[in-house]
């Protein structure tokens, strides 16, 4: 994606948490490329999230026990997945 745009990224730091990425950006220490799913809603108004359209696709799977009812969190995930078009930063594959 970067090479196609003629850009060479200068990676200064990496972190595994969404909160740390957003905080670094909020403080003006750069920009971040991240998966918006874990926390892309309710961001500080001083941070703006913009969609990227990379040249690759990925799939997220949800695994549950076959013999048990889906817990509340699972039902929420299923609801979000079925209604992706209603969320600004999620697009269906």
Image (tube, rainbow, N blue to C red):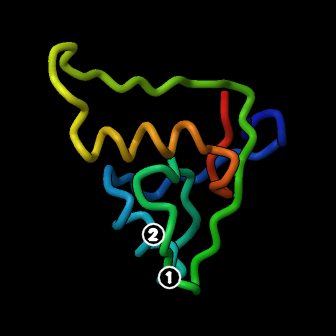
Residue count near mark 2 (Cα–Cα under 10 Å), binned few <14, some 14–19, many ≥20: many
| Circle 1/circle 2 CB separation < 8 Å | yes
The answer to which of 63 and 75 lies nearer the viewer is 75
- Please give the residue where the numbered disc 1 appears in the rendered image: 44
- The x, y position of residue 34, in whole percent, is 51, 50
The answer to which of 63 and 12 lies nearer the viewer is 63
Viewer-nearest of labels 1 and 2? 1
- The x, y position of residue 60, in whole percent, is 46, 27
The answer to which of 82 and 69 lies nearer the viewer is 69
Q: For residue 22, which numbered disc appears in the image? A: 2
- The x, y position of residue 23, in whole percent, is 41, 75
40 left or right, relative to 74: right
Label 1 or label 2, whichever comes before in sequence order: 2
60 left or right, relative to 52: left
Q: Is mark 2 on a helix, strand or loop?
A: helix
Q: Is residue 86 above or below residue 46?
A: above
Q: Name the residue: 32% across, 50% down.
A: 16
Residue at the far top: name it. Answer: 66
């Amino acid at each position: 994606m970067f090479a196609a745009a003629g850009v060479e990224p200068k990676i200064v730091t990496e972190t595994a948490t969404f909160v740390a990425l957003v905080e670094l950006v909020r403080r003006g220490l750069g920009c971040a490329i991240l998966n918006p799913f874990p926390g892309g809603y309710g961001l500080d108004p001083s941070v703006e999230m913009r969609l990227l359209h990379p040249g690759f696709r990925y799939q997220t799977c949800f695994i549950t026990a076959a013999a048990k009812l889906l817990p509340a969190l699972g039902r929420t995930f299923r609801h979000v997945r079925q209604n992706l078009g209603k969320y600004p930063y999620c697009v269906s594959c």
